[in-house]
């Protein structure tokens, strides 16, 4: 593949719950200055909770389970955001962002809707609330939403639509186990998602009450590039951004990732770059007809499976090489004047 | 001739993933890891279960761990089918 005359615009995919693992992206910490500074900025903004968060992030065996809401959510947010900053520093200028679950807050922060300090406070507020919620879990089912709907019962709902036949259910442990058994008996393939909370289900509703006041209290700006929301399956609008309840309800509302990805790719072909641990969103995106046909493409910044720290670094360099080959040189061409007329597609994300 | 072909596998994978549009995967796809083709372990688990039901064969527990590529998967199914055939003939 050679650099096309008009390279594919880059869209970042930011993963959420389920993608976390111990020491995710930690191989870049201390090696990539921009990533390291962004992580440190997050830990600093987290105040007294920053130290324990960093210790658990870097530990082979964290004191608090990485699948626990108090670890998975803030660290996924921080890692997604810091990887995005790293990409920007390497000269990549995304034309669109799409985050899954907590990844949407990271997207909005990268696009300047929230400042990092405010967003960190909002994430920690969310986590404190969710930690109080009744225990629950999530179950991935190889089936469409329509196929699983007849089996739902109790507080078990569709929490995420990841792909045409990858639906994630969420609910309290007991009822979720029951639905799991029933689905397996009916011949469906199911797998538990690493989560100790029933994200994107009404079980979390009481815990999220009051969160809107926190969102209402922080400055919000228009995004510098389109942020495609997995809650509306459309780009964030001014009224979404203005509405504190839109943000406060995100842990309760279902994630419509596939419809949002379809919406993003309906605007044109993109080079989709997964900016977060693992390759979960990349795998799903590879099933999209535009990627199958080869008109859109997928690059993952990090390895598919956890490994030694140097694999994070080699995966990053391999990904950067692919992004460059796709027509996005690592630095802005110095010969070109910073003229909007020649700058082409959206080019305004500030690092 | 193989009893279970690459075309069989790709058709089943498409069904598992709910891909409406049949886009031909290149011949190189047979040697690529499933994850690169967009099939995660959940889709693979379902593919195994569909192959077992559709072809009347029991695949070893470690098929998922060992067969990272479609080519390896097809070989594993054919090995299982070959192992089964004599028993069926003997019974008949």
Image (cartoon, helix red, strand yellow):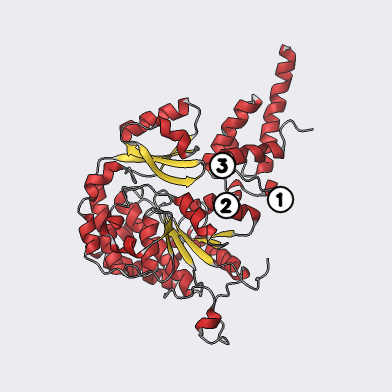
Q: Counting residues from the N terminus, which is met first, the one under dot 3 or under dot 1? A: 3
Q: Residues within 10 Å of mark 1 (few under 14, many from 20)?
A: few
Q: Is residue A219 above or below residue A100?
A: below
Chain of the residue under label 1: B
- Subunit of label 3: B
Residue B44: horizontal and vertical position, in percent?
57, 39
Q: Quadrant of residue A2?
A: bottom right
Counting the numbered discs, the total is 3
Rendered-image quadrant of the C terminus of chain A = bottom left
Q: Secondary structure at mark 1?
A: loop
Q: Is residue A196 left or right of residue A311?
A: left
Instruction: Report the side of A157 relative to B81 (left or right).
Output: left
Residue A31 seen anywhere in this rendered image of the structure: no
Residues under numbered marks 1 and 2 in contact, where contact means CB atoms less than 8 Å apart = no
Q: Position of residue A87 (x, y in %)?
A: 48, 69
Q: Residue at x 59, y 70 (%)?
A: A324
- Give me the C-alpha separation between circle 1 and circle 2: 14 Å
Mark number for residue A286? 2
Disc 3 target residue: B17
At horizontal 57% and vertical 82% (from top left) the residue drawn is A333
| Residue A235 x/y as whole percent | 42, 61
- For label 1, the residue is B26
């Amino acid at each position: 593949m050679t650099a096309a005359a008009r390279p594919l615009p880059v869209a970042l995919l930011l993963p959420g719950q389920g993608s976390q693992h111990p020491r995710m992206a930690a191989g870049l910490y201390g090696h990539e200055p921009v990533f390291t500074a962004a992580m440190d900025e997050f830990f600093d903004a987290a105040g007294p909770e920053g130290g324990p968060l960093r210790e658990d992030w870097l530990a082979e065996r964290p004191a608090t389970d990485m699948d626990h809401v108090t670890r998975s959510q803030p660290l996924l947010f921080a890692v997604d955001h810091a990887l995005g900053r790293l990409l920007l520093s390497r000269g990549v200028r995304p034309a669109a962002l799409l985050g899954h679950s907590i990844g949407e807050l990271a997207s909005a922060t990268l696009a300047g809707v929230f400042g990092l300090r405010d967003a960190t406070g909002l994430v920690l507020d969310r986590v404190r609330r969710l930690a109080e919620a009744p225990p629950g879990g999530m179950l991935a089912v190889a089936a469409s939403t329509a196929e699983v709907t007849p089996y739902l019962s109790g507080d078990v709902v569709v929490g995420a639509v990841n792909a045409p036949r990858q639906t994630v259910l969420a609910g309290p442990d007991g009822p979720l186990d029951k639905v799991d058994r029933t689905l397996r008996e009916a011949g469906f393939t199911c797998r538990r998602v690493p989560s100790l909370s029933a994200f994107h289900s009404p079980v979390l509703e009481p815990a999220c009450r009051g969160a809107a006041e926190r969102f209402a209290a922080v400055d919000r700006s228009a995004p510098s590039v389109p942020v495609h929301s997995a809650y509306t399956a459309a780009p964030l609008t001014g009224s979404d951004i203005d509405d504190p309840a839109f943000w406060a309800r995100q842990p309760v509302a279902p994630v419509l990732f596939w419809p949002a990805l379809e919406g993003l790719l309906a605007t044109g072909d993109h080079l989709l770059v997964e900016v977060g641990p693992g390759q979960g969103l990349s795998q799903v995106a590879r099933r999209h007809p535009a990627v199958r046909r080869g008109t859109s493409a997928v690059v993952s910044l990090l390895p598919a499976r956890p490994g030694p720290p140097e694999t994070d670094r080699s995966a990053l360099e391999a990904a950067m090489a692919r992004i460059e080959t796709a027509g996005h040189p690592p630095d802005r061409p110095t010969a070109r004047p910073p003229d909007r007329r020649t700058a082409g597609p959206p080019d305004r994300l500030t690092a | 001739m193989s009893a279970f072909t690459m075309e069989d596998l790709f058709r089943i994978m498409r069904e598992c993933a709910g891909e409406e549009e049949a886009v031909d995967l290149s011949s190189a796809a047979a040697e690529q890891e499933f994850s690169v083709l967009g099939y995660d372990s959940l889709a693979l688990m379902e593919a195994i279960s569909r192959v077992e039901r559709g072809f009347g064969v029991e695949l070893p527990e470690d098929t998922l761990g060992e067969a990272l590529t479609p080519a390896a998967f097809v070989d594993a199914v054919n090995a299982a089918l070959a192992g089964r055939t004599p028993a069926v003939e003997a019974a008949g």
